[in-house]
Image (spheres, rainbow, N blue to C red):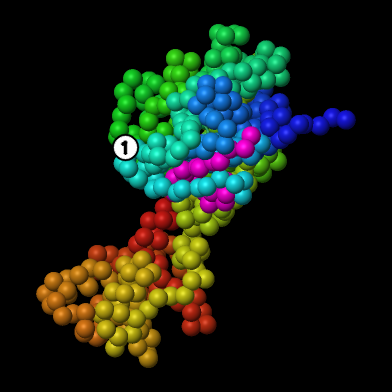
Amino acid sequence: MKYAENILETIGNTPLVKLNKVTKEVDALVLAKVETFNPGNSVKDRMAVKMIEDAEANGLLKPGGTIIEGTSGNTGMGLALVAIVKGYKLICVISDKQSKEKTDILRAVGAKVIVCPTDVEPTDPRSYYSVSKKLGEETPNSWYVNQYDNPSNSIAHYEQTGPEIWEQTDGKITHFVVGVGTGGTISGVGKYLKEKNPNIKIWGVDTYGSVFKKYHETGIFDENEIYSYSTEGIGEDILPKNVDFSLIDGFTKVTDKDAAVYTRKIALEEGIFVGNSAGSAIKGLLQLKEHFKPEDVVVVLFHDSGSRYVGKMFNDDWMRERGFLDEDITKAEDVIKDHIDKPLVIVRTEELVSHAIERMRKFKISQIPVVDINGFVGSIDETNLFQSYVTDKSIADKPIREIMGKPYPIVMATAAIEDVSKLFSKDNQAVLVDLGNHKFHIITKYDMIGSIK
Ligand code: PMP
């Protein structure tokens, strides 16, 4: 009989797969290390086991203890599998930027999940760095993992991922390209490969909104480089100890849009259903193609599974909202495609101004068409509302008729986008679209901006 003693024994020995289409413009052999084959569907299973075993050996984690980590999901999944097999409790602190699927999956494997806001400084007490640290200090018999600075993270890749890639390529690998988050993967694999052959080049893939590339090139930690981005798993606003910059030959940055588009391409063109950082890695590899020669063997690592991104990069509405879908926007109806099914919010001439304010708040909108029994007769927007309020504080109890502006112009659904855009001005904030059958929708300036690629 041939079986594993438990699920942890199935971690590692993932396949190396030749890419045939998505990298066809690259003149080299390109091979993908597909880490989805791990039981937790990501490369992180490897370091989760290593970090826990080292913590046990060092006496940091004791029987029945609680493991605490600030994780974007994949490390949490790996830790959860180990916690189940070894009988620990697990608390994961996750940022609200991460996909809902990741949170649900963590809960499915028994973790307690705490969600924190993304757009706060790492030192802010609400940040997931701070919350996880504090929990570590306050929970009895607990151990705070800290994958960013925990050396066992990169050691796992030095001991397993690196040697696997070396053996699978028969020592012929010339370049390794990989997304960088905690730095564990690039530093562990990079160290092993460079020890075997110092000529192997190690390339990190970074994202816009992250500090790595500039820091590597200039030694400057530039806070201006830090802003929110939608790419998941890579890039940081801190310098984790696990990123060994001396092993990395260079970084390339990939945009959110390219990362999302290439995540889809890998699935469609190779039949490999992997996550968002794989899209970044492939686009990064294409950006680096001038560095590769025909006889080179380039290995790229795919960290996790596409199933964690079905509500995001694999969802048309999510992509469209961000202008990531290369759809032709030529007609009025194209601009409002993703919310065309929602009812048009209106107010009536005799309703009170307070009703309009309430509707603006409720639906988070800045302008509303005004109707009476004859149809569209006016409009109300933040600017005229605000100006009227400053001159007359009792405005909230007056009928809308008294303060409304001109009605918005109406176009057919098939109107050319160039003609629609000409209707916007300082005095006109929106355009109504006649969808037929007495149905109308609204195009706002915000919708027009959203349609710009
Ligand atoms: N991709 C994904 C999806 C990840 O979860 C991570 C880990 N943050 C990375 C890439 C980066 O890997 P590492 O932390 O080893 O640098």
Residue for badge 1: 123
- The residue positioned farthest toward the bottom in the image shown: 373
Q: Is residue 96 magenta?
A: yes
Q: Position of residue 64 (x, y in %)?
A: 57, 37
Report the number of discs. Answer: 1
Q: Point out the residue furthest to the left here.
A: 391
**Residue 6 vertical position relative to residue 187 in the rendered view, above or below:** below
What residue type is disc 1 on?
Thr
In-front residue for pair 31/107: 107
Give the left or right position of residue 169, taking residue 191 as reference. Answer: right
Q: Which residues are magenta?
A: 86-107
Circle 1 SS class: loop
Q: Residue at x 54, y 41 (%)?
A: 90
Asked whether residue 309 is in view, the answer is: no
- Residue situated in front as seen by the camera: 65 or 197: 65
Q: Is residue 392 left or right of residue 448?
A: left
Question: Residue 268: image x %, image y %?
Answer: 66, 44
Residue for point 37% across, 90% down: 374
Q: Quadrant of residue 177?
A: top right
